[in-house]
Image: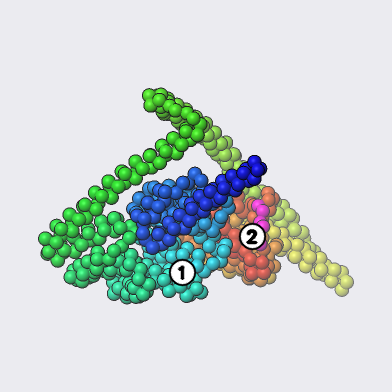
């Protein structure tokens, strides 16, 4: 009997708990319906009867989302935002990505509608768009593109048009008539606010209005009348503007009512003033100020409500722990806590300052080291280039003065020998001719080598003739057609700069000959204002420039160092089997 009574008691307790939980869930469903039908006051009153402490995490997330929507629709944006954040956190804890995306959408709509630029809706927008693309859902993508377009409507209208077009394409997949009307509505705003095509704005507004009236969407119909009135006011048709404002005022709107009325009455007062009806201007200006004061007063009330809510939560926690605190001790405790927080904050700021100072000192020291290494590298390159120039000159002089003169003398002796010898047998004569020809050929090659080694910019010639001369010689020797095209190269440059540019081009063409397998190459030289542009392109085999590594000892490594040494900038553009283009910009000052 005792056991049976215990079972009955347990069953009764479980039934009561289940009934209570069902009651809470049932309230949440009711609140959701109230919000959808724009019965905001009923929704808020019903929310206050929900015991949120008895809800599970999923129900709490739903509760916070509903509370946030109700508060925002009642123009209590700060508390609405706070509840949205609570809802998002709870949905993240239960890993409900779909609901997190929906809350992100509400947050973006709320923050993008404010004029406070420091409220950054970017992260929430990015999360929502990423989820929509991941799901590849036309419904979600339509909302995403609409939302992005609205965000750019004041700053970058051309981007808005592009995103609205994307929204139209996605919406065509679902044939959602209401979403189509909303798109027309926003396109109308774009034409009205950022173009001179006000008739186009009215056209899109009328398309949206037709669907809103079909679905009896009172709030949206009111928005259209308000927007059309603004267009008529811009056109100077103040009578039509006033008529549409009054139509908007006559509708029993339920969402954002206080803010909308405040804005509407300000617009009406302005329209009456422009229409020289100062009596009605004063009337609606007074109404505007009254609603403005009302909104400000309710902002204060909601702030106090927030403080009270936090206090009630704290009170319940204290009651669970059976702790009662004296008001004086509470004040003292709060004062001490405030002092500790202040001291902690100051200590934290001090630590941050020390860390920043240390980081700055470290960065300065690093910059000094990098500058020293850079200076050493530049000095090394200068010395290398100077040594190369001296070595080229020495080799050319040795070839010309020593071996060249020796071969010339030898040739002269053979020619004298041929002249003096009166009778020479045929074989000896043939041998002498062959020897003479070989000496002549060796002499020509020595002269050619000497000129090639000494190829460069002569002080009395200049950069452009030297490059053209070099291109002509390489063309003959290597069976490679090299063209030189110049623009603005009539004036001479400083001699060391001309030598540096010549050596860079010389090495670039050497790379073409060695590696490119090209049949054609063009050297472009352009001198514009204080800048020299060099472009060397070929029709060779090319290479994958993304895999290029500037290893020391390579031709491109040497070229890059030469370019850096004269404060230039080097760009490599090469495609496999389609040739290579090297672009170099060098300042002349």
555 shown above or below 230: above
Image quadrant where residue 458 sits: bottom right
178 shown above or below 561: below
Residue at image point 66% right, 56% down = 548
Q: Which residue is mark 2?
A: 545
Q: Position of residue 82 (x, y in %)?
A: 43, 47
Q: Between residue 426 and residue 212, name the one nearer to us.
A: 212
Q: Secondary structure at mark 2?
A: helix
- With 548 as the anchor, is 357 left or right in this view? left
- With 416 as the anchor, is 474 left or right in this view? left
Image quadrant where residue 73 sits: bottom left
Residue at image point 46% right, 46% down = 51
Q: Position of residue 346 (x, y in %)?
A: 44, 28
Mark 2 vs 1, N-terminal side: 1
Q: Between residue 231 and residue 72, name the one nearer to us.
A: 72
Q: Does the magenta portion include 547? A: yes
Total numbered labels placed on residues in the image: 2
Of the numbered discs in the image, which one, if any, rests on residue 167? 1
Task: Please provide the residue range marked out in magenta.
Answer: 544-550
Q: Quadrant of the N terminus?
A: top right
Of the numbered discs in the image, which one, if any, rests on residue 258? none
């Amino acid at each position: 009997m005792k056991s049976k009574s215990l079972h009955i008691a347990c069953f009764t307790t479980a039934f009561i708990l289940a009934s209570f939980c069902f009651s809470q869930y049932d309230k949440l469903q009711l609140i959701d319906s109230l919000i959808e039908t724009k019965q905001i006051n009923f929704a808020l009153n019903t929310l206050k009867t929900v015991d949120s402490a008895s809800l599970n995490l999923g129900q709490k997330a739903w509760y916070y989302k509903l509370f946030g929507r109700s508060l925002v629709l009642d123009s209590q944006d700060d508390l609405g935002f706070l509840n949205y954040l609570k809802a998002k956190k709870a949905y993240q804890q239960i890993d409900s990505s779909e609901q997190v995306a929906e809350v992100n959408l509400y947050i973006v709509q709320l923050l993008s509608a404010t004029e406070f630029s420091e409220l950054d809706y970017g992260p929430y927008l990015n999360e929502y768009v990423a989820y929509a693309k991941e799901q590849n859902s036309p419904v979600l993508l339509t909302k995403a593109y609409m939302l992005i377009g609205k965000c750019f409507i004041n700053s970058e209208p051309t981007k808005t048009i592009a995103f609205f077009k994307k929204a139209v394409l996605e919406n065509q997949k679902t044939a959602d008539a209401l979403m189509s009307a909303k798109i027309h509505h926003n396109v109308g705003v774009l034409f009205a606010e950022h173009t001179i095509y006000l008739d186009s704005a009215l056209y899109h507004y009328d398309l949206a209005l037709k669907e809103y009236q079909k679905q009896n969407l009172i709030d949206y119909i009111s928005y259209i009348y308000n927007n059309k009135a603004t267009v008529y006011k811009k056109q100077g048709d103040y009578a039509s503007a006033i008529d549409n404002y009054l139509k908007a005022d006559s509708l029993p709107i339920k969402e954002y009512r206080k803010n909308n009325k405040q804005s509407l009455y300000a617009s009406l007062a302005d329209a009456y003033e422009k229409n020289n009806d100062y009596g009605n201007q004063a009337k609606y200006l007074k109404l505007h100020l009254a609603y403005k004061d009302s909104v400000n007063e309710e902002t204060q009330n909601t702030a106090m409500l927030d403080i009270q809510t936090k206090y009630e939560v704290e009170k319940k926690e204290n009651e669970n722990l059976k702790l009662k605190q004296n008001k004086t001790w509470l004040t003292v405790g709060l004062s001490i806590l405030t002092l500790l927080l202040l001291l902690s904050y100051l200590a934290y700021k001090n630590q941050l300052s020390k860390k920043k100072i240390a980081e700055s000192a470290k960065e300065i020291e690093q910059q000094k080291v990098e500058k020293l290494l850079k200076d050493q590298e530049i000095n090394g390159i200068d010395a290398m280039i100077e040594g190369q120039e001296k070595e080229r000159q020495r080799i050319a002089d040795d070839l010309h003065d020593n071996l060249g003169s020796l071969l010339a003398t030898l040739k002269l002796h053979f020619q004298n020998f041929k002249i003096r010898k009166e009778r020479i047998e045929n074989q000896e004569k043939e041998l002498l001719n062959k020897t003479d020809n070989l000496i002549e050929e060796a002499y020509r090659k020595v002269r050619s080598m000497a000129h090639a080694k000494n190829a460069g910019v002569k002080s009395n010639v200049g950069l452009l003739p030297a490059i053209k001369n070099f291109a002509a010689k390489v063309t003959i020797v290597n069976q490679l057609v090299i063209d030189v095209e110049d623009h603005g190269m009539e004036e001479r440059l400083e001699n060391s700069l001309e030598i540096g540019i010549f050596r860079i081009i010389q090495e670039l063409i050497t790379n073409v000959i060695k590696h490119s397998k090209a049949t054609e190459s063009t050297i472009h030289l352009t001198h514009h204002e204080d800048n020299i542009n060099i472009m060397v392109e070929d029709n060779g085999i090319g290479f994958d420039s993304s895999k290029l590594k500037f290893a020391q000892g390579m031709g491109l490594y040497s070229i890059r160092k030469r370019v850096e040494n004269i404060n230039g900038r080097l760009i490599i553009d090469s495609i496999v089997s389609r040739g290579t283009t090297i672009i170099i910009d060098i300042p002349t000052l």
